Image (spheres, helix red, strand yellow):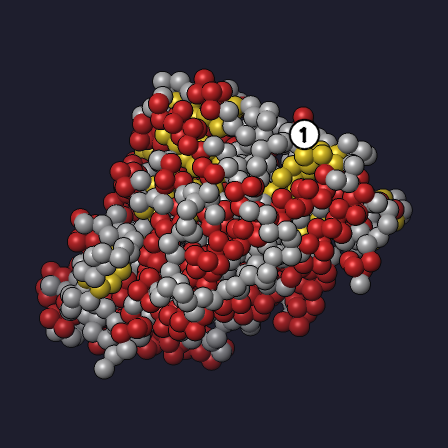
Amino acid sequence: MRNTLATQLLFELSKPGRRDVRLPKSDVPEVAIDELLPAGAIAAAPPPLPELAETQIVRHFLNLSTQNMSVDTHFYPLGSCTMKYNPKRNERLANLPGMADLHPYQPEETLQGMLELLYAMQQILAEIAGLDAVSLQPAAGAHGEFTALMVAAAYFRDRGERRTKVLTPDSSHGTNPASAAMAGFETVTVKSDSSGCVDLADLRTKLDGQTAVFMITNPNTLGLFDRQVRTIADEVHSHGGLIYLDGANMNAILGIARPGDFGADLMHFNPHKTFSGPHGGGGPGAGPIAVRAMLEPYLPSPVVVKVAENINEQANTKPSKNGDGAECHDCYRLAYDRPKSIGRVRSFMGNVGVLVRAYCYIRTYGPAGLRAVSENAVLSANYLLARVKHILPVPHGDRCLHEFVATAARLKAERGVSAMDLAKRLLDYGFHAPTVYFPLTVRESMMIEPTETESKETLDAFAETLSRIVEESPELLHDAPHTTAISRPDEVAAARNPVLHWSPAGAKP
Amino acid sequence: MSYILNTPDDQQAMLAAIGVASIEELFAQVPAELRLRRPLDLPPALDEMELTAHMAELAGQNVAAGQKICFLGGGSYDHFIPAVVDYVAGRGEFYTSYTPYQPEASQGNLQVFFEYQTLITQLTGMDVSNASMYDGGSAAAEAVLMCIAATGRRGSVVVPENLHPEYRQTIATYLSNLDVRLHTVATPDGTTGAELLARSIGDDTACVVIQQPNFFGCVEDLQSLVQAAHERGAMVVAAVDPISLGLLRRPGEFGVDIVVAEGQSLGTPMQFGGPYLGIMACSEKFVRRMPGRIAGQTVDRRGNRCWVLTLQTREQHIRREKATSNICTNQGLFALRATVYLAALGPQGLRETAEACLRKANYARGRLTQTGRLSAAFDAPVFKEFVVRDGDRGVQSLVADALQAGFFAGVPLGGWYPRLSDCLLVTVTEKRTRREIDALANCVSQPNRRQEMVDA
């Protein structure tokens, strides 16, 4: 018989009087609460949180953890999400007290190591982007998109131009048009051509003096490098617009091509994808942006700057020689006085913990290693493509960069088996499913991204499993998965009659 | 090569299966003129021992908060984190998984989000919570956008000066391309005056954003502020300190429309400002305008209770240019930490933590203002932080002297508030002891004498 305790909620395990954390006895005078606070502000009772012992808490969450697939336990070829291995050294180093136990408002002289690291990250990301300046502040990729569009808006405003439109391809991530709307722009969709890239003719009909930014994902969501990108950039620039590069797919081109070199003026990075930060069940990520020099004044405040300072003023930094031979320090400061800055897009410094991990990853590889990352990511993807295309058609060609999109459209038409059915059945065989139903430009799509951190054996096993699954009976596939704790939840009922928190009455459906 | 598994033989076999001679050929679609023709100009590779030494060196050039006695706050707090939080959050099944696109492969995360949402509604007294946002400041800005959409009022947003300056800056950035004015109300006494607030609200004001306790640590009269706003048709966003809710009445009881919070206090390390946990909860009627992920309960095909992401029609991947927000993720790992933290503290633990903050902060305010050098800047009741005015040699030297003596004494306010350039925001969490508080008070009154207990 299954132990039902494992499926209960914290609130159902609660028992009045149970305790875990206790505080030490107060060492300051026990002044009555109502002498310190106005009566109207004090709650009659503490909030109705569950009452549990630590043993229960540990068992509860560890049992829950076994119901997740994760990169540490499974192959996770979730296209566009770049689920690569998360090195353990990075976790350890990011958790050093000198990294994790820092308050954002400590005096700068007590933060020189952290500021040096962040300054180095600004330089490193600018070099990888082929652009001039970096802000580390945005908290996620989509937040970086929003930030960059605000930078673009400030740039045009400062030039006395009022540009209202942002153009996004129909194959773009949904965050692109949403970010544009949030930043106050009207969004205009540009079609893809038959090869899956931007339809230049359609772009030309939509470009005009009102165009602020064209957002492009390159390599795009089909895993293709849009060869026309330079032409696109020239056209957009000739109308006075800017090119934004969605950096979600940077894992394909590290050290191979740089967005700044192929025409981008602004871009964001997804360090949790490209530089292996753990995805944390949906976050945290980070979304640093890189921009061309003319946009630098508008970046969020503060940025990290390096200044030389007299040795006598600082006792806590490394000495170095400056140009005229006098001994001085490289000293790092947070620059807040930036009159043209858009301001800030979140409180404090940014998702520094994610950036520290990314820094460790980049330093582990170095320049040649980073290029090898992309080469092997592309090798993995093309190898898997070569094996999958005999099982499911891959509409956009025999080659890809970091990911490719297969289609189950024919399988659906002939046998009634959908991409979702295949995705669910893969779970039974111990593989996380690829991304399904994105991009929207391919019917019954499965977007597969193996990354460089999987072995040939794993890719072979995945392809063989997919090959076996497409031969299985439609009935078996419709009801998949069969081995997981739950199967095919009723998502319509969840949305129609939302139950968004537990309550004592009616907890059980 | 570090995390690349395939051997040269594997690579050759893979290339053969693809039908190309070299990896270089796979990049044929990248035009030659767009290629980088040199190695990236980056520092050289380090193996694990070298990297460990390098990071230790960088870390050694920082002073960890735990190496000093930390009285810093202002939105990032040195609260105690029980070991069970790190243990659970350190499980790779949690921290190396992703957004639950396949609910069958993610019930662990989805149930945690559902439990997190429940705990946040219990904590705030609100109807619904999402599964978290980036941080407190951006959550406040997103809440403001919700209010503008919900009321159709695009004229102004009103904030008191005692709302966290970085929240105000973030809101200002989010509004700057939408032609909505951000109106700031003066708070000379530290707290927000209901009448002054009321006079700032026009017929086109979408909302007011009240911080409780406010940035100066003072406890606001939330009831009268909510009333003042609602009488004029403006919504109310309350930015709260989640730890204070162990003791203070919950914002839901005052009828606020949206609650946001910085959830870092709930079991997340300070890590120089991020990543943090944005909390957002609202009334039932605004749920379809709420950004971010939401987990909902349902049943599977076998009739078992289970969880899915729900109400996704609000979101960017379906509505694209009509989306209410561009957020496509949440702070899952920190929502997990907050869930474990709140489960570990329970109602009594949270109450005791809040009471300890309250008593120790008030004790510290008393001790520091007995020094002769410092005085309380405001009279209002405080919860865990307070502002002192330095009548002596200036705040910068006080902070520098205290640092020499082993203290992070507080956050100078002059950078944000010129009229408070002689003021310091001092924070006292449950971790500070009477001995540490007394030592700070002694240090402030005798700044040149090093404190033996700190050096020992």
Q: Is residue A61 left or right of B64 when viewed as pictured?
A: left
- Say which residue appears at 64% left-offset and 29% top-offset: B417
* Picture layout, residue A325 above or below residue B89: above
Q: Give whichever of B250, B283 is nearer the camera.
A: B250
- Residue A485: x and y in percent read 25, 72
Task: Mark 1: give few (<14), some (14-19) or many (20+) Cα within 10 Å.
Answer: some
Q: Quadrant of the N terminus of chain B?
A: bottom right
Kindly tell me whether residue A23 is visible in this rendering: yes
The kind of residue tagged 1 is: Leu
Dot 1: what SS? helix
* Picture layout, residue A159 above or below residue B73: above
Q: Is residue B55 left or right of A59 when viewed as pictured?
A: right
- Say which residue appears at 54% left-offset and 30% top-offset: B191
Q: Quadrant of the C terminus of chain B?
A: bottom right
Kindly tell me whether residue A214 is visible in this rendering: no
**Displayed quadrant of residue B204:** top left
- Residue B356: x and y in percent read 57, 52
* Picture layout, residue A53 above or below residue A257: below
Residue linked to disc 1: B420
Q: Give whichever of B246, A96 is nearer the camera.
A: B246
